[in-house]
Amino acid sequence: MEVSVQKYQAFVETVECGSFTRAAEKLHYTQSGVSRMIRDLETEWKLTLLERGRGGVKVTAEGRALLPYAKSVCTEAERLRSRADELRGLRAGLIRIAALPDVSAGYLPNKLAGFLEKYPEIDFELLIGDRTEGEKRVLSGEADLGVLSLPVSPELETEFLEQEPFLAVLPADWPEAGGGVFPVAGFLDHPFLLPEKEDGGEISALLESCGIAPRVRLRCGDEQAVLRLVERGLGASILPAMAVVGEREGVAALPLDVPAYRSLALVLRSKKAASLAVKRFMEVLES
């Protein structure tokens, strides 16, 4: 803060505290420093602002008349400093996002475009992986935030974003492809392509909750690779709707007869401790 504003602040605090000592403690100055700044103001303005006495200090009539203006200067100086900090914080920086593969392709592009229209100097790094990888990256600090499916570790803070349906994905030339919905039990009649790297994923949990254990022909954590395999007629699968973006020749995507959804959330270690750029991007994601 500029020295002149410090003088106004010293004057305001001394009046409110009624003491040079208490004002100095609050402002983290020395008592002599506070006293000197107020004397400088009195010299500059050619007015007596405070009456000094054994019982402390009292504001004079002239000081009382000028006090609201001094407070206003201090308030505006603080607002100016805060705004400058905001602009400085948003003119450069890097936001690292841990994101699911389909989220990075189907959800984030529009959000990133909207944010960069306002803050073109901010750079992004997408760290793409499954939910487990995303959690680890956010917890370790490798990522500033994640856009992941719930649930996640209780050590992380979350903000719900949206709910998204799971779809049955099967070759377009299968007889069931022409139906309105696909029965979950229908996966028992065909080879299943499990789009998970490890056990305990969302699709496995969904099948288990329905009491279904299809024959897994292939396990693959890459959703786009699963789509290509379905297109070649190697089996059927279940994918989030976001992963089936647009029309894909040779692939049919149908609602399940037992509706199932995943919840996408913004995930981070601490919203309070997040950088200004991250907080502004979070606002875009939540809008």
Image (spheres, rainbow, N blue to C red):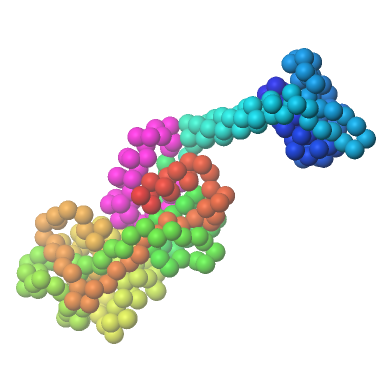
Residue 191 visible in image: no
Residue closer to the observer: 97 or 187: 97
Quadrant in which the N terminus is drawn: top right
Q: Is residue 222 magenta?
A: no
Residue 104 visible in image: yes
Q: What residue appears at the point 18 percent right and 76 percent down from the top-left corner?
A: 257
Residue closer to the observer: 22 or 126: 22
Q: Is residue 208 above or below residue 153?
A: below
Q: Is residue 185 left or right of residue 177?
A: right
Q: What residue appears at the point 77 percent right and 14 percent down from the top-left corner?
A: 46
The stretch of residues the image draws in magenta is 95-123
Q: Is residue 225 above or below residue 56?
A: below
Q: Give the x, y percent position of residue 134.
A: 44, 58
Q: Is residue 39 above or below residue 132?
A: above
Q: Is residue 108 left or right of residue 145?
A: left
Q: Is residue 100 above or below residue 17?
A: below
Q: What residue appears at the point 38 percent right and 52 percent down from the top-left corner?
A: 286
